[in-house]
Image (cartoon, rainbow, N blue to C red):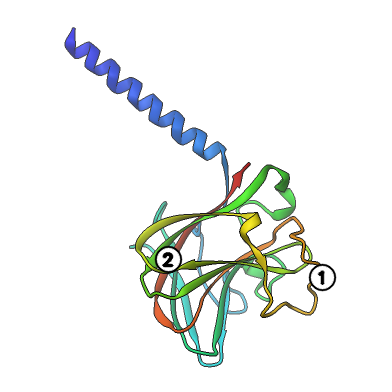
């Protein structure tokens, strides 16, 4: 009798956890899991680069990952006065970077109010910029301190992004309004720092 009771408790706990995980998945929309090919260059799948003597390299990491078979690895050396970017999305110079699991025009953004991503910190002490690009090609930014080591989930409300004042492309409408759909996300370690970061599972979070 006791064995049956114990088994019933285990089964109930299993279904409770399963339901919780299922509910969490239903509350989010996975847009990029970095499971496919990660490569650079004109025909690559990541639009990345650096300037003014800063350096950045990207590749797939199969050793350090939050979910699935691999994560995005970003090795960087950010110096004073330099800049860099690591982007995935649409209307970029590298067309192959437009490989989200769901295309922006297929997403009902009225149902979502935040961007979520897992980041594996390097504890460099610098700031990491997380940018999104709206439908008017305007760049919006959020800054996170790289003051931790290991995986951390970042959930960033759209309302916490601010329009970049340091740079905008010429084609940006610069209207100061976050116009949906969002079509790009990108990461930029700020100067002065050197290290390796990892990113995984970029999602939209429902209201």
Q: Which residue is mark 2?
A: 198
Q: Quadrant of residue 89?
A: bottom right
Query: Label 2 crowding class (10 Å Cα cut-off): few <14, some 14-19, many 20+?
Result: many
State the image coordinates of residue 98 (x, y, percent, origin top left). Answer: 65, 64
Q: Is residue 197 above or below residue 170?
A: above
Q: Reading the chain from its start, which is encountered first: label 1 or label 2?
A: 1
Query: Label 1 crowding class (10 Å Cα cut-off): few <14, some 14-19, many 20+?
Result: some
Q: Quarter holding the N terminus? A: top left
Q: Secondary structure at mark 1?
A: loop
Q: Which residue is mark 1?
A: 173
> Looking at the image, which residue is at 70% across and 54% down?
104
> Looking at the image, which residue is at 82% across and 70% down?
173
Q: Is 51 or 68 nearer to us in this picture?
A: 51
> Looking at the image, which residue is at 81% across and 67% down?
175
State the image coordinates of residue 14 (x, y, percent, origin top left). Answer: 35, 27
State the image coordinates of residue 40 (x, y, percent, origin top left). Answer: 54, 76
Q: Is residue 16 left or right of residue 161?
A: left
Q: Quadrant of residue 84?
A: bottom right
Q: Is 87 or 40 nearer to us in this picture?
A: 87
Please state which of the two labelled residues, at mark 1 or mark 2, is closer to the viewer. 1
Q: Quarter holding the C terminus? A: top right
Q: Is 87 or 159 nearer to us in this picture?
A: 159
């Amino acid at each position: 009798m006791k064995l049956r009771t114990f088994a019933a408790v285990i089964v109930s706990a299993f279904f409770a956890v399963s339901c919780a995980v299922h509910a969490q998945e239903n509350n989010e929309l996975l847009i990029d899991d970095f499971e496919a090919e990660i490569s650079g260059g004109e025909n690559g799948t990541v639009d990345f680069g650096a300037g003014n003597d800063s350096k950045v390299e990207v590749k797939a990491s199969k050793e350090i990952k939050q979910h699935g078979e691999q994560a995005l690895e970003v090795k960087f050396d950010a110096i004073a006065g330099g800049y860099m970017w690591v982007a995935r999305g649409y209307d970029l110079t590298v067309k192959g970077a437009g490989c989200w699991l769901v295309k922006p025009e297929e997403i009902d953004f009225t149902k979502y109010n935040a961007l979520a991503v897992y980041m594996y910190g390097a504890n460099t002490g610098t700031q990491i910029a997380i940018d999104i690009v709206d439908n008017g090609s305007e760049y919006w930014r959020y800054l996170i301190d790289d003051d931790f080591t290991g995986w951390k989930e970042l959930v960033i409300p759209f309302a916490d992004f601010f329009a970049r004042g340091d740079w905008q492309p010429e084609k940006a409408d610069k209207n100061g309004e976050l116009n949906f759909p969002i079509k790009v996300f990108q990461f930029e370690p700020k100067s002065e720092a050197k290290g390796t970061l990892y990113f995984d599972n970029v999602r939209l979070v429902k209201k």
